[in-house]
Amino acid sequence: MESGHTGCAPALPLVSIVDDDESVRESLPDLLKQLGFAARAFSSAEEYFASDCVDQTRCLLLDVAMPGTTGPDLQRELIRRRQATPIIFITADKDIIVRQRLIEQGAVECLFKPFSDTALLKAVNSALNPK
Amino acid sequence: MEAQVEHSAGEIKRLQRCINDLVSLLALPAVWSGGDPSQVLHTLLDALMRMLHLDLISVQLKNPVGESPVEIVKIGELRGPIPPAHDICEALSHSLGGNSRKWPPLLRKFMGGGDVSIVPLPLGVQGELGVIVAAAQRADFPQQTEALLLSVAANQACIGLQEARLRSQQKRIADELDKRVAQRTAELAAANAELQLQVGLLQRLPVSAWTLNPDGTPDFVNQVWLEYSGQTLDFIRSHPEAWMIAVHPEDREAASMAFWEGVRSGQGFAFETRSLRVRDRTYRWHLNQAVPLRDAGGKVLKFVGTTTDIDDQKRAQEELRASENDLRQILDGIPGLVAAITPGGVPDVMNRPFLEFFGKTAEELRSWSTNDIIHPDDLPRVIDAFTSSIATGTPFDLEIRYHRADGVYRRFEVRIHPARDADGRITRWYGLLVDIEDRKLAEEALNKARSELAHMSRVTSLGAMTASIAHEVNQPLSGIITNASTCLRMLATDPPQVEGARETARRTIRDGNRMSEVITRLRGLFSKKEPATESVNLNEAVLEVIALSIVDLQKNHVSLRPELADNLPLVTGDRVQLQQVILNLLRNGSDAMSAVEDRPRLLLIRTERDEGDRVRLTVQDAGVGFDPEATDRLFDAFYTTKSEGMGIGLSVSRSIIERHHGRLWAKLNDGPGAAFSFSIPRSSEGLARADGIRNPQPPAVPGPNAA
């Protein structure tokens, strides 16, 4: 699978994906590329932070429920590091209360799986171009 | 010698004349008898004047008791001017002085133009009566014989005066006595008349009137009492306790005590007895009252009393008391707290349950707004509503928490309603407080059970399965959508990215397969599990489901009509799963009618025997129905016409029914709406009753059995 072995200095805006779900890591980067972005996928928060893409990441697609460090944990760590990367949560749990809370805590959007490509595009655009 | 003879003849004549006069004087008392003092004196003076040829004679009587001084002057022939009698007397008094003892027997004075010889004659032993003064101008006045006559006359005057005085005194006394007697007689007559009147009154008063001696023995008894008791006055007088005979035997002891206590203490008494009326031999209630009559020193002279027939009043009182008692019992028997309230808003009468609930007296309960019987959070609202009601006359209907005697708060439904007179004015308010705490608790328990069941529907097999399917399917589904989107975009570029499209298509197909596997696997998992089997009364199961969903149905204005067959056979199966199916069908039926406005939202649920020893349940709605072309697809997984649904319900319901060896199907009605039915085999034992209930009552505490 393509996962972008180039170093993290992409010409196109970089969207990073952190999800323990393999099918997500498999499918999303290709879609994002079709939508005009660069994409890198990571299986955990640790892998993400261990990479050199943290600073380059223009938008983070983050799973909520992950073993070990969860999505919100990762979000807090970024705040601690003063890394103002815009975050779009993706989750299978269709709980609108949780969604609301995540957005209140700073996420740009929280998408429920399965989401359409148009929903994804809209979310990423608003993350990259905040009004 | 001749001169001596003449002298002697004259002397004899003079003596004869003197004796005659003496005799006359001595005879005067006879003349005087019966006369008054002035009469006496006048007679005497006239006699003396005549006898002695006096020029003046006067008398002065000193003031006897009750009479004015008497002065009489008689004048003879005096030469010269005649001074008035009074002056003469005064002059004489001056000349003579007060003390008669010092008077000379003879005085010569110049009066009336010449010298006059004056002889004072004191009257009385010491002249205390008065004085007679005889005067003459003759030089030889008074001669011996004249002097004798004068002194005898003075004596006679005394005698006469004293007798006259005595007589008049006696007369006066006699008159006084007569006057007194007359007065007394008149008084007595008047008193007598008064007495007669009083006695007449006493006799005529329409009460028994009587008097007692200070020792309590009978003194006087009026006619009324005699007639009433049939006793005679003699009998009463000779039998001091005759009155007791008329008293009812049961009352005698108390009456006797009161009577004798009253007599002994001198205070009198007042007590009630039943006394026998002789005329018709009935006992009637009487009030016996006596008051003491005291003299100026406070000693009791008599007791005066009456015995009044109070029988009618007493019976009326008893009837009133009895009817009040009945009313009271009715009031106390009402299974609620009842109070009567004045038009001004003050609680007046309270029934026994009312007082017992609060454990307070009626008096304490009147201050309900301050004595803590109402929950403090409810109090402001209650005071507002109450004062408004009382002021405007509109009834009051509120739910209030009251503080029971044991300290617990109980919820009450309180209604206060006015009662009006013929003119529409409010005469009273009546309040009824009904304890609804138990009902409320039951409602709350019901609500709790309902929400628990709803919650349980998430953890029963249906819920669990739904959740697991949703979760398991979600992943491949997301992949399908993402990969498919990518694939399409890749094909749309110029030139198309065929290699990428091929890859994403491959993934899509792979995920699709995976999804089917998941569903198949879960279904298989589901079908492998044997349901908990028991004998199920389908009617009861239906009723429980209805109880739990009735509120939602009513909120959606759905009219539920159960038609549950009598003698429905029992079925064997998992009670809870069957209830889930019924719940699912009811919900679908209700949802199907959510847009219906022009006809009643009627939801029919029917149980009946089906052929081949089966039991059928049907839920029929009057809703929008379904597309007849899609009849089969209704029960497919994910088929849904609802915007929020995932269409799991009917699919799973069918699975459940099939595992019960039954079948679930749908049919469009002749009219609007559809009917969903399932039919499952009956069990080998027993029959279920429908209880003949057309409008089911929810069970007190619904408890679906654990699956």
Image (spheres, rainbow, N blue to C red):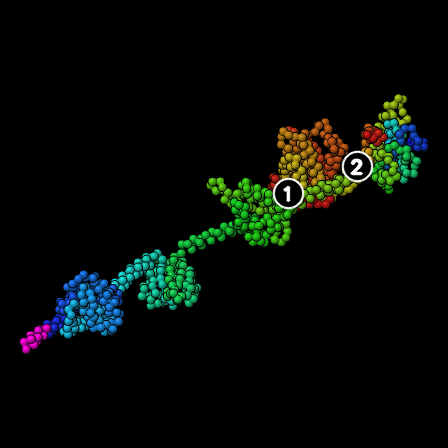
Q: Residue furthest top?
A: B494
Residue A36 is inside the magenta segment: no
Q: Position of residue B264 (x, y in %)?
A: 42, 67
Q: Position of residue B447 (x, y in %)?
A: 67, 43
Q: Is residue A49 left or right of residue B201?
A: right
Residue count near mark 2 (Cα–Cα under 10 Å), binned few <14, some 14–19, many ≥20? few
Query: From what the image shows, is residue B259 above or below residue B632?
Result: below
Quadrant in the picture for residue A112? top right
The image's mark for residue B698 is 1
Q: Residue at x 57, y 41 (%)?
A: B388
Residue B2 is inside the magenta segment: yes
Q: Residue at x 40, y 62 (%)?
A: B291
> Which quadrant: the N terminus of chain B?
bottom left
Quadrant in the picture for residue B486? top right
> Which quadrant: the C terminus of chain B?
top right
Amino acid type of the residue that numbered disc 2 sits on in the rendered structure: Glu
Viewer-nearest of labels 1 and 2?
2
Most foreground residue, B280 or B151 = B151
Dot 1: chain letter: B
Most foreground residue, A34 or B240 = B240
- Whether residues under marks 1 and 2 lie with C-beta atoms below 8 angstroms apart, the answer is no
Q: Is residue B10 left or right of residue B541?
A: left
Q: Residue at x 87, y 36 (%)?
A: A83
Amino acid type of the residue that numbered disc 1 sits on in the rendered structure: Pro
Magenta-drawn segment: B1-14
Q: Is residue B12 left or right of residue B317?
A: left
Q: Residue furthest left?
A: B2
Judged from the image, the secondary structure of the residue bearing numbered disc 1 is loop
Query: From what the image shows, is residue B642 above or below residue A80?
Result: above
| Residue at mark 2 | A104
